[in-house]
Amino acid sequence: MLVSVVVPLLNEAGSLRELQESIRRAMAGTGAEWEVIYVDDGSTDGSLDALRELHAADPHVTVLSFGRNLGKSAALAVGFREAAGDYVVTMDADLQDDPAEIPKLVGALERGYDLVSGWKKDRKDPLSKRLPSRVFNAVASRLSGLRIHDMNCGLKAYRRDVVKAIRVYGELHRYTPVLAHWAGFRVTEMEVTHHARRFGTSKFGVERFLRGFFDLVTVLFLRRYLMRPLHFFGMMGFVLFLGGFGIGVYLTIAKIMGEAIGRRPLLTLGILLMVVGVQFVSFGLLGEMIANLKGEDAPYPVRVRLSREGATRAA
């Protein structure tokens, strides 16, 4: 059995050596083969230099580095693509996630689950982060139909089939449990230890919750209308066109009865509704055409690659 640990990071130079040692200790007692894939998301604080040292000292370490900040979803996407393990574990690099939890998560996979999401029940963050996160998780859980407490915990474990089946792009990394659940995989949640941050600063502010809401809308839309966009745009277009057509019929009758309608705002509104309705139906038809084209994974360019075969630079 091979376990791949994928660690996306941005400006976490101070924690990387301790993190690697903690992962090594956690994996030493499992008896499993393992690898660690660090994905540097355009760090500017010397993280890449620290990763070079870890790679030189430990053959388990693979390093991927972006030339600029592309986001956590992009980092996870390339980490999933690189991972060769039967099981894939993700965790943050700030030492708030505890590598000692890895054997417990992997054990749940061995019992038959496909994805195990960590739950930071005793979260060591200020109230200004905990309270909005609790509200966000409650709303996301209810709307998605997957009843778990902590969608955005970085510590998760996946079977290989899951990471190869779900597409992570934009900022949809928050919803990998939902995407896996909707794809038919067995998802569960386990309490995990959470530590206070000791190095660096948080990379997320209040705006993450607004982005998270829009991401939730995206996920819900993709769930219901990805392969049938005409059902969404066509319905809205039909309602708008019907409203405009009804106004047109009313004004036509009024004109026949001798009433002047040329300067009535209602005439403009009726025409506008019909035009917009036709446009929405056209959007739906274009969406249907796109949905029938073969999609490809978004190309996330890797600037530096350090693997067991040595260092190469992406073309």
Image (spheres, grey):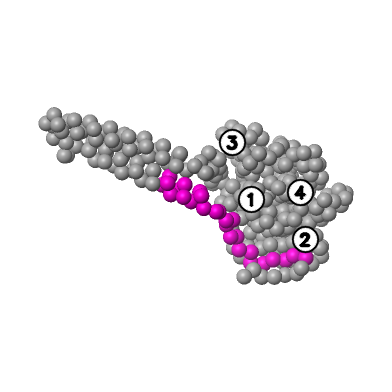
Residue 235 lies, in percent from the top left, at: 41, 37
Element type at mark 4 = strand
- In magenta segment, residue 299: yes
Identify the mark nearer the N-term, 4 or 1: 4
Residue positioned 31% across, 43% down in the render: 275
Q: Secondary structure at mark 3?
A: helix
Residue at the top extreme of this rendering:
257
**Amino acid tagged 1:** Ser
Mark 1 closeness class: few <14, some 14–19, many ≥20 residues within 10 Å: few
Q: Nearest to the eye among marks 2 and 1: give it.
A: 2
Instruction: Give the amino acid at mark 2.
Output: Val
Viewport quadrant of the C terminus: bottom right
* Amino acid beneath label 4: Tyr
Q: Are marks 4 and 2 in contact (CB under 8 Å)?
A: no
Do residues under tags 3 and 1 come within 8 Å of each other at their CB atoms? no
Q: Disc 2 designates what residue?
A: 61
Which numbered disc covers residue 295? none
Which is nearer the N-term, disc 2 or disc 1? 2
At horizontal 64% and vertical 68% (from top left) the residue drawn is: 314
Please give the residue where the numbered disc 3 appears in the rendered image: 144
The residue at which mark 1 appears reads as 202
| Magenta span | 283-308
- Give the mark nearest the N terminus, 4 or 3: 4
Q: CA distance from mark 3 to mark 1?
A: 27 Å
Image coordinates of residue 124 in percent, x first then y, are 70, 41
For label 2, count other residues whose C-alpha is less than 10 Å away and answer few (under 14), some (14-19) or many (20+). many
* Location of residue 145 with respect to 275 vertically, above or below: above
Residue toward you, 306 or 110: 110
Give whichever of 189, 161 is nearer the camera.
Answer: 161
Q: CA distance from mark 3 to mark 2?
A: 36 Å
Mark nearest the camera among 4 and 2 is 4
CA distance for labels 4 and 3 = 25 Å
